[in-house]
Each structure stands twice: as C-alpha cells, then as structure tokens.
C-alpha cells in the first residue's frame, strides 16, 4: 500500500523525511525525555533499547502497516521530532496518527504545519478514509492541536490502559476524508 519510494514532503519551514539509523540519538533524546513521554505510550532508558523503536519504524514500512517521518529543518537537517501513521488497515481504509516533538520546539506551530501534509498523503496516496488519534485525557496541548487540525472528538475510553502503575483514559479524535468512496 505504501509507495516503494519513500515520500519526502516539504512544508514552508520543514522537511519530512525517512527516519534513518543516524536519527537514533534524537529518537532516544525525545523518547526518554520526561516531558515528551509524560503523555506518550513508549519510552526508553538507553540508546541501545531505542533500537527497538528504530526497528518498529522499519517494520511499519516493510509490512505496509505504517510510515513515520523525521521532522527536520531543511537547511541544516536539525531534528525537531517525528510524526506518522501506524496500525494502517488497508481493508478498513484507516490508520492511527502519532506525533511528538522535542521540548525545545513546542509552541512553534510545527504540528499544525506538518500534520496536514501527512493527512493529505494518507488520503490521496494511500487511499485512506479515516485517520484517528488516541490522546491521553490530561494532554491538553495535543487535544488542542487535534481540534485545530479539524479532528473530531469521538469519545473517551475510560481507564483503558495502565501507565506507570495507574489507569489512564484515552480520548479518540478522528479526521475523515470526504472524497474517499465507500
């Protein structure tokens, strides 16, 4: 379902490119940072353990079940974060959106700039009809981004997962592609 040629995309300020092996330090920096992982489902305590995340990105592409991009500044390739699609189901024409930024890039309008490119790719190139996001109920900033991007709040799964020894609830947001035939 995903093109053999990895799609790079350029926004007005950023390049979305394939996550490569040399990104592992930046992936670890993000997915070990307490402020990033507070509302994120994955975290790592060592660079070696982060290899599992790098393998996951590659497996998504290999199996056609997702695609993730590094978000970088185009001139100097400065790594800001990552975003992408996982749990891609071709039969049901849907995928789950995931995203995170290093804290130094928060509040700069990066996600509202890059996520529409990912959604357009998902709808127009992958033929998806639905993109959904699961957001922890306490993640006020991410919920605001979802609303800003036109995602619709569909409900809350209360106490549906355990994180750090306590139950968390997840809100479901979705964006539908009106032009996709049923």
Image (cartoon, rainbow, N blue to C red):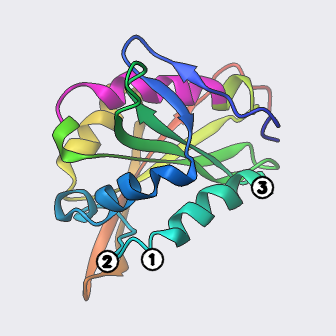
Where is residue 21 shown, x and y percent of the image? Answer: 56, 54
Dot 2 and dot 1 residues touching (CB under 8 Å): yes
- Element type at mark 2: loop
Residue visible at 78% across and 55% down in the picture: 62
Q: Name the residue under label 3.
A: 62
- Element type at mark 3: helix
Seen from this angle, which residue lies furthest bottom? 165
Residue visible at 28% across and 73% down in the picture: 168
Spatial separation of the CA atoms under disc 3 and disc 1:
21 Å
Q: How crowded is mark 2: few (under 14 residues within 10 Å), some or many (20 or more)?
A: few
In front of the other: 100 or 123: 100
Dot 3 and dot 2 residues touching (CB under 8 Å): no
Where is residue 145 shown, x and y percent of the image? Answer: 29, 34
Q: Up-down: is 157 above or below 60?
A: below
In front of the other: 33 or 118: 33
Dot 3 or dot 1, earlier in sequence: 1
Q: Name the residue under label 2.
A: 45
* Span shown in magenta: 106-121
Spatial separation of the CA atoms under disc 2 and disc 1:
7 Å
Instruction: Name the quadrant of the N terminus.
Output: top right
Where is residue 20 shown, x and y percent of the image? Answer: 57, 48
Q: Is residue 43 highlighted in magenta?
A: no
Q: Residues within 10 Å of mark 3 (few under 14, many from 20)?
A: few
Residue 49 got which mark?
1
**Left of 181 or right of it: where is 72?**
left
Residue visible at 31% across and 28% down in the picture: 110
Q: Please tell me whether mark 3 or mark 1 is closer to you in this view.
A: 1
Q: Please tell me whether mark 3 or mark 2 is closer to you in this view.
A: 2
Instruction: Name the quadrant of the C terminus.
Output: top right
For the stretch drawn in magenta, the main secondary structure is: helix
Dot 3 or dot 2, earlier in sequence: 2
């Amino acid at each position: 379902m995903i093109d053999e040629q990895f799609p790079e995309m350029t926004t007005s300020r950023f390049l979305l490119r394939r996550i490569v092996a040399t990104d592992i330090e930046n992936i670890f920096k993000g997915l070990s940072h307490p402020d990033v992982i507070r509302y994120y489902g994955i975290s790592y305590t060592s660079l070696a353990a982060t290899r599992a995340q790098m393998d996951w990105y590659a497996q998504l592409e290999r199996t056609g079940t997702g695609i993730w991009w590094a978000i970088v500044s185009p001139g100097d390739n400065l790594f800001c974060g990552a975003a992408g699609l996982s749990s891609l189901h071709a039969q049901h024409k849907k995928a789950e959106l995931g995203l995170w930024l290093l804290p130094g890039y928060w509040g700069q309008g990066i996600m509202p700039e890059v996520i529409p490119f990912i959604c357009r790719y998902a709808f127009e190139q992958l033929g998806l009809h639905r993109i959904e996001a699961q957001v922890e109920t306490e993640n006020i900033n991410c919920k605001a981004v979802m609303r800003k991007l036109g995602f619709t709040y569909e409900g809350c799964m209360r106490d549906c997962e355990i994180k750090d020894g306590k139950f968390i609830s997840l809100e479901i947001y979705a964006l539908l592609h009106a032009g996709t035939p049923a």
